[in-house]
Amino acid sequence: MAAGEQQAVHRPGSYKQQNKAHKSGRHRGRGAQERENKGRVSAKVLCKKLKKDLRKVDRRHKANQIRRQRKDAVLTEKRNLGSKDGPPHLVVVVPLHAEVVTSSVLKLVQSNESTVLHEDDAKNGKFALVSPKMKQRWCFVQANKDDLHSLLDLAKVADTLLFVVDPQEGWDSYGDYCLSCLFAQGLPSFALAVQGMNDIPIKKRNDTKKHLSKVMEKRFPDAKLCHVDTAQEAALLLRQISTQKQRHLAFRERRSYMLAHRVTFQPSDESSLVGTLKVSGYVRGQELNVNRLIHIVGHGDFEMSQIDAPPDPYPLNPRVHKTKKGQDVEMAQDEPGHCAEMEEDVKVLMKADPSVKESLQSEVVPDPMEGEQTWPTEEELKEAEDSLKVKVQKKVPKGTSTYQAAWILDDEESGEEDSEDHDYNDDDMDDDDQEDAMDEAVSEEEEGSAEEPEEESETVTIPDSTRDDKYDENLDEAEEEQMLEKYKLQRQDEMFPDEVDTPRDQLARVRFQKYRGLKSFRTSPWDPKENLPRDYARIFQFLDFFRTRKRIFRELEQEEYEGAMVGWYVTVHITGVPVSVLEHFKQGEPLVLYSLLPHEQKMSVVNMLVRRHAGNTEPVQAKEEMIFHCGFRRFRAAPLYSQHTSADKHKSERFLRSDAAVVVTVYAPITFPTASVLMFKQRANGMHDLIATGSLLSVDPDRIIIKRVVLSGHPFKIMRKTAVVRYMFFNREDVLWFKPVEMRTKWGRRGHIKEPLGTHGHMKCHFDGQLKSQDTVLMNLYKRVYPKWIYDPYVPPPVTWVKSEVQLEPAEVEME
């Protein structure tokens, strides 16, 4: 028993020890397994971290590589500009004051002893400087301050703009206007120069410098003003121009461009009106491909047939001839006049390949067999009318006389003709309600004309009336009346936006037959392909414009050209050019060429984002003809204005607003952004006023521009949630026609028409709350609008701009 008891006592202890050992072993196994798992997880995490670090390193390496490439490209461009491997440094001299004489500044620049002077056109101020010592060459062109188009065209191709200011005032009103246009278009590298500071007395010189520096800070806060009174200062100015950092313009980075140096014309027909234009100049920007189309600024798009390589007129290392005189040896340079004798040295670089070169087709020719959504022809309309007449005559009830049938048909036809005429006016004019407002304004002026003789008799008694009479001789009374009417319409649109009076002599459902009601302007659907006009069959459209733009730019970077490199002096043969282009060049106007990217010759709907220029307050109505400078293009068009929002529908504006950015929509050739936009309006005397500035937004024919018309009514009898409304319609048929359209009030109530009351347009309406007696009931109707097709690439040259001293503010116009 004792042994058994001892065994019994010993067994539980052994079991406990075994359990403890088992548990401890089990815990040891779990810990090892967890450690192994943690090791595996940490290895995965480390791999992920290593991959991320490698990606970061690759990104940094690529970013650094791109930075080095850009830096190398900038350095090579800076080194090549003006050297033997690049084009001459093109400097455009711009006087900013009427008292500035640029010829004296240019004479000091020409007097540099280390440079060789080449005079091309002394009359127009064109010359070139070549410095073998500095290994640089410059080409100076003097801008015509009286021609704004020439100034803007030269700024499109200039490497540096040299602004010459007056020592007393800096610049005048015309100089400030030119600076506004240049800043809006895109300003390249510039330099400021002043001459005549030494002629000012010493006592007044410091005050003059302080005043001039304050004037300069408004436009050029960090610029350095160079004094050019001696040849040494002119040499310093020349060195600053050649060493300063070059600023790039977005619209010329991916295109090839050149300024014409010499131009010849070879007629291709008997009339000598059209022929081949041979333009010689230096290739700038990108390489020039003969199979691409080329744009002559202000004249249109053309094709190239050949590119030649004549001798360089401004060689940095001119050819040297050895002539013996006895025992001496002289070194003589080739003069520019000898270039005509070296025509046999001209080499043909490229000839156009008909199978590869791009087409000049700018519009789509619609095929009637493809089911294009176009407007029917006049013959088809006549056939449809005849068929309708026959059908109506067959449906005449029995017993109806021919006189009654003829009377019924005439009534329907007259109604159709009225509706067609009204549709035509609604599409071509801006607004029919604006015509009514203009008629009211004219009638108001006619009513107030009875008081004008008394006012005239009073003004004659003023002693200094001769000066006023001379001032009145320069005013156009008809233009003043039109301007006053526009101001009144603009003021009325600001006070009562989109509100229109319902016509009493015409049914509202006929007057507004193209309009529709929307439950919500933001969320209600609108098909962009619905009821398109005939002009939409002539344009081109991209499935995704920005993706196409990205693809074309990527192909341009990867493509290797076989043509004229940047800096080469070439002669471009342009076919199908009118002789008027040569005449413009002979008159002293610059000829600027730009190569086009793929698809840029095709017509489409172009949208531009602009903002009103602060210096102009004149009312600008929609569909009024304007002049556009879009990138390298210049054309005339009739734009539409709409709000700049992120929605799929955009509300149109009757006038160009001055308090917000507005989207301008026109028919124009496709241009890939980025490109600057300048919008001008031509006065009756030929001057061009800067109206708005901005940039190119997109090329999108599917942009839906909605015109809104607001019909207003007055609550006649007000109940709890119902009211009797009048003066919105004037007959029972219109009330029934517009019954499904939702209504709102100016105080935020919403409702709908329940039923008409009587025959004079009274209607019973139900609202979501009780109306106030001073509230106004409104009904919104919507219609999609399209721009007018009046695109014209030719813009007449402007007259010298003079600041308009008399400008009427919209707030000063009284509304009765």
Image (cartoon, rainbow, N blue to C red):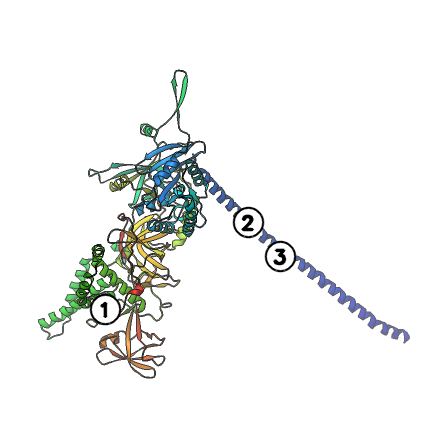
Task: Give the number of the disc on residue 78.
Answer: none
Q: Which residue lies furthest to the bottom in this view?
A: 719
Q: Residue furthest front?
A: 203
Pick whichever of labels 3 and 1 is earlier in the sequence. Answer: 3
Q: Is residue 780 left or right of residue 558?
A: left
Q: Residue furthest top?
A: 326
Look at mark 1 in the image and give the residue it sits on. Answer: 511
Q: Which of 379 and 89 is in front in this view?
A: 89
Callout 3: helix, strand or loop? helix
Q: Which residue lies furthest to the right in this view?
A: 2
Q: Nearer the viewer, residue 484 or 393?
A: 484
Callout 2: helix, strand or loop? helix
The kind of residue on which mark 2 rests is Arg
Q: Position of residue 105 (x, y in %)?
A: 37, 39
Look at mark 2 in the image and give the residue it sits on. Answer: 60
Q: In this view, does 148 lie to the left or right of 87?
A: left
Give the CA distance from mark 2 to mark 1.
Answer: 65 Å
Pick whichever of labels 2 and 1 is earlier in the sequence. Answer: 2
Q: Where is residue 596 in the image (x, y as percent from the top left)?
A: 35, 45
